[in-house]
Image: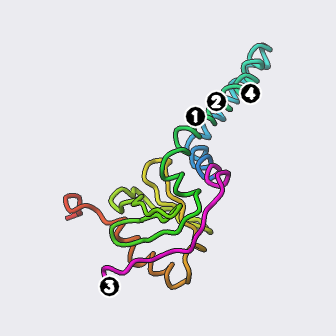
Amino acid sequence: MNETTAITTDVYHIGYSRYFTLLCSGIIRDWWSVALLLAAALIIAACYDLRYGIVLLLVVFVIIPMLLFFVYYHYALLPECLYSVTPKSLVIDKQGIDCMAYETKRHILNWADVKRITTTREACLLYIGRYTFFYLPYDAFATPAERQRFFDEMVPAALKMPDDKQPE
């Protein structure tokens, strides 16, 4: 294929709730054991002293909602989330991803910034940080051939190791 050929997607967007659900599921997948240990310890302690039951209720009704607000403001309001949930079309090339949203073209992602790529059954998640990702659904591509071209040409560019880290 030609090096200058870019892939242009159809206009798409996802809902904030879908993005936040994916974000929270990644965090819960990493931290479920801590939450389970804390809940088990408080439940066992509540069997001996009722005050620990009150602490458990405070954790459930005060601490957990505060943690959800923290996650929302810390992760979900990053530019990658904004560009994931706004109606847009993308121009994907060998350098990265440009976004056409609100009649303005912005460069939003360099392939060098992508740490890992995860695929789900409906989308490709391009991770920039541990919990920061750009959501690219499969149905945004106009044809299955363009989607295959994305995986054949652009994904290897994203996962390419810098020259100083090449295995010998």
Q: CA distance from mark 3 to mark 4?
A: 56 Å
Main SS of the magenta part reads: loop
x and y, in percent, of residue 164 in the image: 19, 58
Residue at image position (58%, 70%) is 11
Nearest-to-viewer mark from 2 and 3: 3
Q: Is residue 58 left or right of residue 96?
A: right
Amino acid at circle 2? Met
Per the image, the residue denoted by label 4 is 61
Q: CA distance from mark 4 to mark 2?
A: 9 Å
Here the colouring is rainbow
Residue at image position (66%, 35%) is 36
For residue 70, the mark is 1
Per the image, the residue denoted by label 2 is 66
Dot 1 or dot 4, earlier in sequence:
4
Q: Is residue 96 left or right of residue 42?
A: left
For label 3, the SS is loop
x and y, in percent, of residue 71 in the image: 57, 39
Amino acid at circle 3? Asn
Q: Which residues are magenta?
A: 1-21
Per the image, the residue denoted by label 3 is 2
In the rendered view of the protein, which quadrant contains the N terminus? Answer: bottom left
Check contact, mark 3 vs mark 4: CB within 8 A.
Answer: no
For residue 60, the mark is none
The answer to which of 13 and 125 lies nearer the viewer is 13
Residue at image position (64%, 30%) is 66
Q: CA distance from mark 2 to mark 3?
A: 50 Å
